[in-house]
Amino acid sequence: MMDQRWRPTVNEREFIEHALQSDLRIDGRRPFDFRKLKIAFGREDGSAEVELGETRVMGYVTAQLVQPYKDRPNEGTLAIFTEFSPMADPAFEPGRPGEAAIELGRVIDRGLRESRAVDMESLCVVAGKHVWSVRVDLHILDNGGNLIDAANIAALAALCTFRRPECTVGGDDGQQVTVHDPEVRDPLPLAIHHLPIAVTFAYFGDGNIMVLDPTYKEEAVMGGRMTATINSNGDVCSIQKAGGEGVTSSVIMQCLRIASVKAADITSKIKSNVDEYTTEKAVRKVKRTPVLVAKKNDVPDITMESNDGALESQTSKTPNDAQDTSKGDDDYRIKRISPLTGDRTVKPKQTSMFLGGPSNWDPYSKGVSLSSLRISQLPDPPAKPNDKRHEDAKSRLSESNLDVESMPNSGIAGESDEAKESVSPKSLKDAVKPKHKRKKKQHGKS
């Protein structure tokens, strides 16, 4: 409970009061100066942590579909829940919320809901049946004084970054609600018209001395407190005076003027932090691939096409013009694309593979036989089959073969060897000059 808070001694109380009379505070601030404000956002949308000096508060926003109130069938709901943990202050006890927790929730709820900061009608899905119920949970992490202002800023920052799932209405009767997954459709932000900022003042003595943003020790010494909720336009949303010393109307008006200036500064800080968070989230959402340098490949650009134009495929492109390649298949032709030479169409050429033989081929070598030089094994003519040179070569080789086969077989033992040689395959020299040998033999016999 807050009644069991730290109680200052008489000397500490007098020291704080005398310092305030001299416009000095125990932490070195001026009477109307705020402590250093830090706003951090969590990984999920709708989560924010505020650090105001030594005070730390975390806000978390959730939403669910519920039935609306009967008197307001087309408006959603907004609820504030606070949690005071003993980790924040030994005076806080777990269990049922105390008076301080209830007061904190009511002040923030009145500033947000009564001022219509959040558009409640935009939370309606089906009038009278389905509306969004927004819940704000405020967790006190460390009590360093002025919990109301820190919790209010945490609630506003969490609401600004919250995204509710998108839903559509369909079905036969038009009453069926479909809630879409965030991966399917982007969630929608809340419609927030303005940001009501809570500014708390503490009064000392007879109410003549007042300070802004009291600390934990100043709250133990103060005689009264007033919280003014005001937006950046200067509109007063709510005022909370929780007992204590009475103050005059002139002091209240002075506090409102100071609060309007401080509210504008805090609003700009909240919006700047929210914009930074939104930008970082958008950058993380975009999938970026590393920049790859294109490598130049020497593979030519080849397109295979059939005669009827049914097959056509292109592989790659190179700026250098390469030599034409051909294939022995008559059903395809090779088309090469080059930026310098344009399209080229190459007709297929028939080629024959050379098997065996020395690198420097000698027609008179003993390793080559007549059978390997037959016309059937010679390569086909590349372009014109009616070539006179090939016909002359055929006629000469055919005459030589006829002359060799027409020689009579002799019964002499010496001629049997010659007959075996004629039957066996002969070299190119014997095939080309068979008549000279026969003349030499006849001349020897005569």
Image (spheres, rainbow, N blue to C red):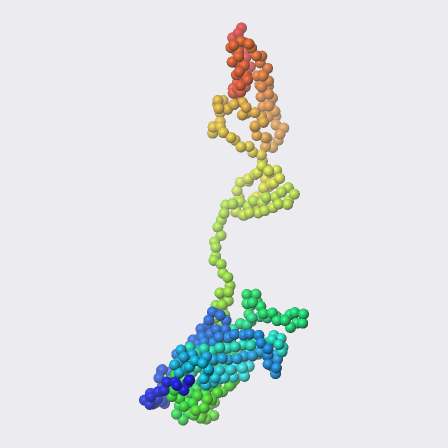
Q: Is residue 265 above or below residue 431?
A: below
Q: Residue at x 43, y 92 (%)?
A: 245
Please name whichever residue, 75 or 296, is drawn nearer the observer in this view of the structure.
75
Q: Is residue 258 left or right of residue 7?
A: right
Residue reaching furthest right?
172
| Place of residue 175 in the rendered image (x, y in percent of width and height, measured from the top left) | 64, 73
Quarter of the rendering occupied by the N terminus: bottom left
Q: Residue at x 67, y 72 (%)?
A: 173
Residue 29 in view here:
yes
Q: Is residue 182 above or below residue 300?
A: below
Q: Is residue 375 left or right of residue 44?
A: right
| Place of residue 212 in the rendered image (x, y in percent of width and height, measured from the top left) | 42, 85
Q: Residue at x 47, y 89 (%)?
A: 241
Q: Is residue 305 left or right of residue 253?
A: right
| Place of residue 135 in the rendered image (x, y in percent of width and height, measured from the top left) | 52, 77
| Place of residue 148 in the rendered image (x, y in percent of width and height, measured from the top left) | 45, 82
Residue reaching furthest left?
11
Residue reaching furthest front?
95
Q: Residue at x 61, y 24 (%)?
A: 391
